[in-house]
Amino acid sequence: AQSVTQLGSHVSVSEGALVLLRCNYSSSVPPYLFWYVQYPNQGLQLLLKYTSAATLVKGINGFEAEFKKSETSFHLTKPSAHMSDAAEYFCAVSQAGANSKLTFGKGITLSVRP
Amino acid sequence: DTEVTQTPKHLVMGMTNKKSLKCEQHMGHRAMYWYKQKAKKPPELMFVYSYEKLSINESVPSRFSPECPNSSLLNLHLHALQPEDSALYLCASSLGSGDQPQHFGDGTRLSIL
């Protein structure tokens, strides 16, 4: 069994401020973890993934995430927010094996204030 | 540019109509997926095809009928839909194993009158 918890539904930051989007997971086996971003009227775009190599993962658009097994967390960060980062962000978990399902968190809306 | 192409981008249909959604990928992926997404919600898995065979059906009503004609194409046939079926329908593809990310199309926005 696997699940993802994204606390809160909306995060607002000022342009240039740190972005921190939280994700906690539950998995009965070692997980694979993903962050996706969805801009209005678009599909989901992969930001980064953790697949048991380095625990600090760098992604596109300056985002990174750190896998912490002891905290069952995979929080997404970006040092300096840009207006273009405003979007919906989904954390997701899957497990090894064929036909493995991707389980999404409920998502967080990021707003960036000028 | 997305590598998974979905057509049409928008579709409005009545409850008695029959229509189809199409999805195409040329990344050599062997797994293809249909998701339904309501506003401000995460995608909900509907179907999974693996090597052109239906491997997962998440108890989707029979008014949705998937089809995988070949490894690059995925269709979703729609018939007698209900207003609550109005949503964004997303197609995705992947190499199939759990460590491989899914690549999503931009979806078809479906409205049922």
Image: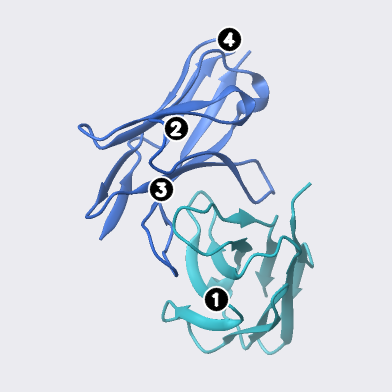
Q: On the image, numbered disc 3 is attached to which residue? A: A106
Residue at image x 62%, y 88%? B80
Q: Position of residue B71 (x, y in %)?
A: 69, 76
Numbered disc in front, either 2 or 4: 4
Numbered disc in front, either 1 or 2: 1
Q: Position of residue B34 (x, y in %)?
A: 58, 69
Q: Which three-letter amino acid code belongs to the residue tagged 2?
A: His
Q: On the image, numbered disc 4 is attached to which residue? A: A16
> Element under label 1?
strand
Residue at image x 41%, y 37%? A53
Q: Is residue A30 above or below residue B71?
A: above
Chain name for mark 3 = A
Q: Position of residue B30 (x, y in %)?
A: 61, 70
Packing grade of label 1 (10 A; few <14, some 14-19, many >=20) is many
Chain name for mark 2 = A
Which of the marked residues, 4 or 3, is nearer the chain's N terminus? 4
